[in-house]
Amino acid sequence: MLSRDDSRSLYITGGQGGNGGHGHPHGTGGPGGTGSGPNVNIIEHQSIVYNLHPGPASQQAFQPSNIQASQTINHCSPPSRIFQGRRNILDKMHSFFTSDVGIQHIYVLYGLGGAGKTQITLKFINESSSHFSDTFFIDASTIATINTGLKSIAVGKGSGDSLQDGLLWLASRVEEWLLVFDNTDDPSINLNDFIPQCNHGNIIITSRNPGLRVYGSHSPVSDMEEEDAVALLLKSAAQAATTGTMLNATEIVKALHYLPLAIVQAGSFISKSQDLDGYLTLYTTNQARLLSEMPAQTHDHYARTVYTTWQMSFDRLTQPAAMFLQYCSFLHHNGISEQIFIYASGYTFPSYGPSKEDLREPLEFLSHFLGPSGEWDSLQFSNMTNEVQAYSLISIDAEKKLFSIHPLVHAWSQTTGNPEKYLSNMGSILGMALSARPLYDIQLGSLAICPHVELALQMDAEIALGFKEQYGVILWEAGKYKQYEKLLEGVLEKQKQVLGDNHPDTLCTISNLAMTYTDLGEHQKAKEPNLTVLEKLKQVLGDNHPDTLGTMSNLARTYSCLGEHQKAKELNLTVLEKWKQVLGDNHLQTLHTMGNLARTYSDLGEHQKAKELDLTVLEKQKQVLGDNHPDTLRTMGSLASTYSDLGEHQKAKELNLTVLEKQKQVLGNNHPHTLLTMGNLAWTYSCLGEHQKAKELKATALEKQNQFPLPTHSPSLHVSPPSPLPLQPSHASPSLPRPRKLGRGLKKQTASAAVEPAPAGKTKATMKHALQDNTRPHWR
């Protein structure tokens, strides 16, 4: 038996489990057999590894005299031979455990299964063995294994044979012992019951459950740094680090999202096939198989694959939690919001949409989070998401109230059920949410929602026609005009088949499609469909119907883009008068049309009229929509352009700076409207003589335009393509063409081209305006 002063560690393995009970005629098995006691091995200056999952052990087998008889010298497992990186976490742990002598130190490593928490712990122990008097390594996956581990400490130290004896021995030894609770993944276990109640000693906890952070200092364990991941792959694949292999390895670890276990599995496969070059192609078409197969040769004692590691956690989830993860696997892996499900639960079933029977399965899922009166129960939803997070299968950003899923978990969870079913149902839930959500919220949230819509369309989800129209709202608001065009073409084809060519819904889709042609710079292509639709809508719905007026607005915008400004003016005046009669002076649709009319005045050189109208619209939009709404920002951009038209460049600069900052927040850095404001601001800088600022901003805008190409004219604005800027600054000719306000430097040319200083006091009545048109699709 080890004495109390013996600093050697123990390696304890489980005894033989007893035979199972005999089957019962009604399907209930008999009691389990009695297992034999554990085997205990003395280890010189190594960790105690408790890997016990015994059945009920007999008291006799657990007596110290019986344990002593089976002691042999052995060594516990070191960290993996190919361990790589994690220096930042290891350094933090070393600093933590060597500071503040005289207190109990607890450190938690938490993260997704397969991220390498146990390996980091073993590496730390390997580097710190001289610092600790004893090291005890307990398998904490179940209460039984924790109990066994703590009992074994008592037995090994000659201090008794119970759980409490083990805890008392630790509490009584005022030394630098280290106790490791490994794989503490079961959220139902109260670990505090097993922590020695004392002010000394050191404890490391590894877990998938981020909730265990409450016990002490902590580090999330997630994806590896790229350089370390590449080194790990090449080591596990037995490949030399050459320029070629490192390039191939970099692409592979990117595809594996830098997850250590996935990288080691890939390396093991490559070491057999010796085909590093071809692995990525093979992985693209066989991801599930490759991440499910256990390598024949391993570098450590971890006995699970990536997918089986996560399946174990998935199997512990309640049904609603498991379904939530499966549904979310068909949203984008980032930016998942409770709001999607809240709005979907409020869907009201309009007469032209899917029936309750069509949406039976989505409704059944949502019902798990409804109270007795049908109201949304956020507490119930929160309990469910916390359950999934307890296994690190999702991450929660508490500040932004958003969920995310590791990309590999996201792909794996799609394989845990019927993918067609969950894709279709999630597509319906998203459509229900968009149908029930106010347009105001959709406009503000398009940047966040668009990735979910794009994924559903990309995966070709079976989605009701009405929901596809709602998807179109998001694409248009997010500036995805080409994708919106493709979606509308599909919707139009179905509407013609089901409703006929002259149904109002079909005609509205044709009008919206024509507006998209305008967004993409195909102005002549947009003119004829708008004229045809307008004539038919007048016959079917009358001159004053909102759909008729919406098509008139679209046609007016097309006229402006074709340079027919007088026609645009007359049509906008007619539409404005009718909106005032139907909706009143302060309705948002009335304000949109006033903004369009202001653009037309500017096109005709009537800049003072444009300014007065812009100021009126802006004041009312701020009252109704707030300062940060996309429509408010468009009008602010319009007013800035009008200030420039009037030579008030300082005012234009200040307003453009405000608009740009807010558009980055609301629409994102790469939205077409954001890029166009950057062009407008670059022009304003030029007008003020700040040529270096103009040049730098223009170069940035051009670089982003190359990455995220704009249409040939300003998206959703009635403007013509921008005129090119002169390549050299010049004051020689006051008649040099000023760039149209759409472009403001966004015409593709060399980024180093100089920006022309604007001749003082000169404006052109024919310039066009960026970020001013308030025309939008008229959805039914």
Image (cartoon, grey):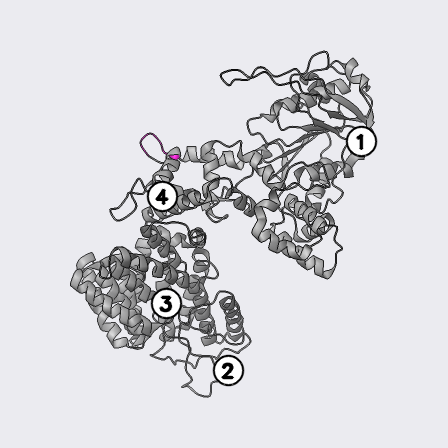
The structure residue drawn at horizontal position 33% and vertical position 79%, both measured from the top left corner, is 765
> Could you give the CA–CA distance between mark 3 and mark 2, rounded to whole angstroms?
31 Å
Residue designated by label 1? 75
Closer to the camera: disc 1 or disc 4? 1
Q: Residues within 10 Å of mark 2 (few under 14, many from 20)?
A: some
Label the magenta part by its dominant secondary structure: loop
In this rendering, the answer to whether 7 lies above or below 655 is above
Residue found at the far top of this picture: 60
> Could you give the CA–CA distance between mark 1 and mark 4, rounded to whole angstroms?
58 Å
Q: Which mark is residue 729?
A: 2
Q: Which x, y percent locates residue 309?
A: 60, 37
Report the span colored magenta. Answer: 369-374
> Could you give the CA–CA distance between mark 1 and mark 2, rounded to whole angstroms?
78 Å
The earlier-in-sequence mark between 1 and 2 is 1
Closer to the camera: disc 3 or disc 2? 3
In this rendering, position of residue 266 left or right of residue 68: left
Q: Look at the image and say whether residue 353 sits in the magenta stretch.
A: no
Q: Amino acid at mark 2?
A: Pro
Q: Which mark is residue 772?
A: none
> Could you give the CA–CA distance between mark 4 and mark 3, rounded to whole angstroms?
30 Å
In this rendering, position of residue 180 left or right of residue 654: right
The earlier-in-sequence mark between 3 and 2 is 3
CB atoms at circles 3 and 1 under 8 Å apart?
no
